[in-house]
Image (tube, rainbow, N blue to C red):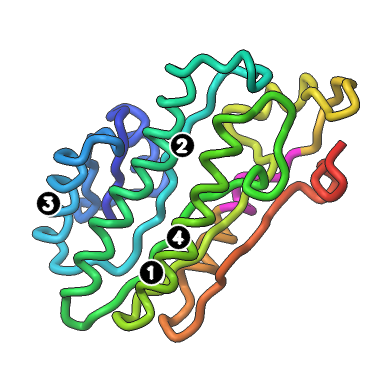
Amino acid sequence: MALVGRKLDRLEETANMIGATAETLVLQADVADEAQIEAVFARAVNHYGQLDLLFNNAGTSAPKAAIDMVDLRHFNRVLATNVTGAFLCARAAFRQMKTQDPQGGRIINNGSVSAHVPRPNGAPYTISKHAITGLTRQISLDGRPYNIACGQIDIGNAATGVADNLNAGMLQPDGRTSPEPVMPLASVAEAVRCMAGLPLDSNIQFMTIMATQMPFIGRG
């Protein structure tokens, strides 16, 4: 297993949480930097000999603002991480999976329920997650001849670092601010494990996992 991200302390924290062994690589890189991504994928493949799975999980968001008030700096930063970063990682994985023997592998993209329905004042994030759906579909199509499967998991309210905001109250489309239910992070991990554990002749194309009572269907 290789863990890749910008913040080395968070990567090491994750490695400790999962009980990583000496075989686990902790690789610091900015997913939006082409040279850094090419280097970490080359190092991982050199270490393990092949690449079976990519979970495209890096993501960020922007300060909440109506679309006419969105700062271009924030928009570009979100797209750099959420779209360019996902593309660069998927491209590197696809190249390896296409040429290795045995051929093939699986790519799982982390979308969001915002890939289906937006939150108020969330244009940069919503746009980026709709782009992930396009990336997922394209990889699924282009990967068919090479036994490369691609799916997307769209995650709703989970007990991560943003749970405090959800508990405190989120702006709803009708103008109210209301707390929203969250689901255990373990539920998300189990869903990803389910997708990752399938044989390559089977694929979960799109999965939505969410807190049962959160506003999503008919959001707000």
Pick out the residue farthest to the front: 68
In space, the residues marked 3 and 2 are separated at their CA atoms by 23 Å
Q: Amino acid at mark 4?
A: Ile
Q: Residue at x 57, y 59 (%)?
A: 190
| Labels 1 & 4 near each other (Cβ < 8 A) | yes
User: Reading the chain from its start, which is encountered first: label 2 or label 1?
Assistant: 2
- Describe the element under mark 4 as helix, strand or loop: strand
185 drawn magenta: yes
Q: What is the C-alpha distance between the residues marked 1 and 4?
A: 7 Å
* Residue position marked by numbered label 2 in the rendering: 59
Q: Nearer the viewer, mark 3 or mark 2?
A: 2
Q: CA distance from mark 3 to mark 4?
A: 21 Å
Q: Nearer the viewer, mark 1 or mark 3?
A: 1
Q: Amino acid at mark 2?
A: Gly
The magenta segment: 182-188
Residue 158, image x, y percentages = 66, 41
- The image position of residue 87, as x and y in percent, is 34, 49
Whether 89 is among the magenta residues is: no
Evaluate if marks 3 and 4 touch, with contact meaning CB atoms under 8 Å apart.
no
Q: Say few, some or many: other residues with alpha carbon within 10 Å of mark 2 (under 14 / 14 to 19 / 20 or more).
A: some
Callout 2 secondary element: loop
Dot 4 surroundings within 10 Å: few (below 14), some, or many (20 or more)? many
Secondary structure at numbered mark 3: helix
* Alpha carbon distance from label 4 to label 2: 14 Å
The residue under the point 50% across, 48% down is 131
Kindly give the residue lying farthest to the bottom in the view shown.
201
Quarter of the image for the C terminus: give it: top right
Give the mark toward the camera: 3 or 4.
Answer: 4
Question: Disc 1 designates what residue?
Answer: 106
Above or below, comparing residue 170 to residue 88 in the picture: above
